[in-house]
Amino acid sequence: MLKAALFDLDNTLIHFDEREFFEAYVPQVSRVFSDLMPPEILLEKLLLSTQMLVMNNSGQMSNAEYFMSSFSQGYEEYRDEFWRRFIKFYEAEFDQFRSLVSVTPGVREVFVKLKEMGVKLVIASNPIWPEIVQRKRLAWAGLGDWNFELITHIENMSHCKPHIEYYLEVCQKINEKPDGCLMIGNDPVNDLIVAKIGMKTFLVTDSSEIGVSGLELSKSIRDDSATESITPDFKGPLSNVPGAVEALLKE
């Protein structure tokens, strides 16, 4: 029987053009570090450190520790200051990017229905952002006050999608087996890979209006070499998720 529903966040609950978002984000965060690091180096380090985190962290340390170790190479004396400034920037200024994001219609209604069904609700977003960013983006989706079983973020995880170990780590944290969970997301690689460990999958189609170029950034920082085409158990708009959950609860 189904025990938990895991939701991706990016282009599942909120929609945005990744390239447009990044082009707005980089100049603002560069300003915060301008006295410590030239903008061109910061851009290079952001991309490379994120790619290394997604591809290479195998659980030996938290994602935050891994990212900061990579990001601060050559600037080790500023490592703690870098982290402090990142968090201060996200707390004080991240909401400026809200205008670049739209929300999937009926998000909160979906979560209300699932709560009534009694399943655990998890935000299984690729953990490359700090908790403060995840919570702000959930607030944009109308879920800022929601008491989730788990929200994955850079500080509390030690793997990333599409590694199976990320999902096993989630299952361990919520004390459920993979075959008792449903993963809901828009990415055929990052989100459907869980079928390999017996988790049910729902491929969300609401973000299909975003062009291929608008989704290329996240694809560019992951390793797709070992991926294969996986057919989801369910496919459709987010509004159809409660029906899928209801069907799985009857099994």
Image: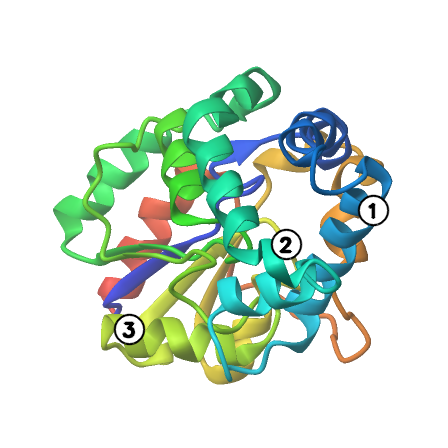
Residue under numbered circle 1? 41
- The three-letter code of the residue at mark 1 reads Ile
Where is residue 138? Give x, y as percent: 38, 35
- 115 on left or right of 155: left
- The earlier-in-sequence mark between 2 and 3 is 3
Q: CA distance from mark 2 to mark 3?
A: 23 Å
Q: Residues within 10 Å of mark 2 (few under 14, many from 20)?
A: many
Residue under numbered circle 2? 187
Quadrant where the image shows the C terminus:
bottom left
Nearer to me, 160 or 212: 160
- The three-letter code of the residue at mark 3 reads Lys
Secondary element under disc 2, as helix, strand or loop, is loop
Q: Is residue 23 visible?
A: yes
Residue under numbered circle 3? 173
Q: Which residue: 52% across, 39% down?
A: 85
Q: Residue furthest front?
A: 77
Secondary element under disc 1, as helix, strand or loop, is helix
Q: How many marks?
A: 3
Where is residue 92? Give x, y as percent: 43, 24
Q: Is residue 23 above or below residue 185?
A: above
Nearer to me, 237 or 250: 237
Q: Which mark is residue 55?
A: none
Q: Which residue: 56% across, 67% down?
A: 160
Q: Is residue 1 visible?
A: no
